[in-house]
Image (spheres, coloured by chain):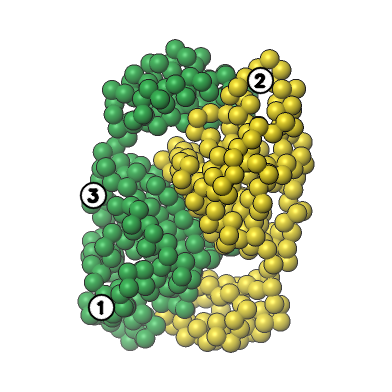
Chain colours: A yellow, B green
Amino acid sequence: MATAGIVIIGNEILSGKFADENAPWLVQRLRGLGVDLGRISTIPDTLDDIAGEVRDFSARFDWVFTSGGIGPTHDDLTYLGVATAFGRPLLRHPDIAEMLTRKLGERCNEAALRMAEVPEGAELWWDGGFAYPLVVFRNVVIMPGVPGLLRHKFESVAHRFEGIPVSTDRITTLASEPEIADALTEAAGCWPTVAIGSYPRFEEKPPVVIVTMESRDTKSLAACGEFLRVRVPS
Amino acid sequence: MATAGIVIIGNEILSGKFADENAPWLVQRLRGLGVDLGRISTIPDTLDDIAGEVRDFSARFDWVFTSGGIGPTHDDLTYLGVATAFGRPLLRHPDIAEMLTRKLGERCNEAALRMAEVPEGAELWWDGGFAYPLVVFRNVVIMPGVPGLLRHKFESVAHRFEGIPVSTDRITTLASEPEIADALTEAAGCWPTVAIGSYPRFEEKPPVVIVTMESRDTKSLAACGEFLRVRVPS
């Protein structure tokens, strides 16, 4: 079972200039692949924030996906942040520099070549249709912030992250949360491999509570569902 | 100038069962109020995660807004998490217990009364139309996860957070990022109080780059905008 964390890098998200489309998309894709997402962090474009969060996430999770901050402008600090997180320098990678020179021709100036400066020891994954590779340092997959590019890049390497999918069950009830709380607590104790959630929907008429169950242990999931269907009026 | 962090608490967001509506909404509201949002963290319903994140955010920012985990069921651990963050016990608050008893009548069982167990020393803000108060511990404003309730609660106390709004400017250009990178770097150096961002939109035909500027220092913002309009073809 693989775990993952997502680090969304960008002042533009925190200041509300652009809505983040990448975390919601990655949440669904990781779910589909059977990867357990443990945390999402949205942080500013500052070196300390990037380095600190990447170091922390890299130690906590099997995979870390970052989004944003890999372009050629002054606010693109993700490669430097990842390098700093692991005490490595940035090096101009000859393969990326060669690709940029070939692709951009005479428009390939020093600013463009900043995109070739990656943490020393990074792997380049050349999968996918775009010329520019995915840069991966240890377990940190460094992705672009532009939603279309991120999706394309992720899909090209998604098979590398595949895990065991989670099975789910849910009950929608007219009972209130206080009325079913004891049953849920009992079920959570009996089937510790089943994650049980309870979500009131006051905007429904009449209001309902959605009880969700999920597990990779299908036997426990079935037993838990059977128990709760008796105790929670559906 | 006030700063803030948002902590979204809930496995249901990380597992993709429900999309998070609260962070995007709060981003826009805080922006409108002139509060600088420094970080958003989306974490699971576990005591360690909640306590650790709340402690960290409380030290970093003027205000911390949490969302979720304050209902009566086993997965509602936010009050305990906040109490743990500050080394305080949970206490059954007589005013909330009295309100719950009055409101729920004979349906007020022990599970419901869990909602009266708040960190020792918490303030109760009784603003707004709902019976249940906002519970605030130091600078941590503990909000419900249900989007309609969160919005209502936030609006009832929004005036407490008001700061100085940020002014903005933007240029849309057909130039590529490498072509304008030097001008942006120079502007960022000349006007350090202006936050400059650069966002390629490859999905536009033809592709454009949006250059954004923002600051509370309107003179610098105007000078920076004037400089960049000369250097960046719009």
Residue B150 to residue A207: above or below: above
Q: Residue at x 31, y 54 (%)?
A: B63
Q: Residue at x 61, y 61 (%)?
A: A61
Q: Quadrant of the N terminus of chain A?
A: bottom right
Q: How far across and down, in percent of the image, does residue A7 sit? A: 54, 50
For the residues labelled 2 and 1, the Cα–Cα distance comes to 66 Å
Residue at horizontal 64%, vertical 62%? A3
The residue at which mark 2 appears reads as A108
Q: Is residue A56 toward the left or the right of residue B170 in the image? A: right
- Label 2 Cα neighbours within 10 Å, binned few <14 / some 14-19 / many ≥20: some
Pointer 3 or 1: first along the chain: 1
Q: Residue at label 3? A: B159
Q: Amino acid at mark 1?
A: His
Q: Residues within 10 Å of mark 3 (few under 14, many from 20)?
A: few
Viewer-side label of 2, 1: 2
Which residue carries the number 1 mark? B93
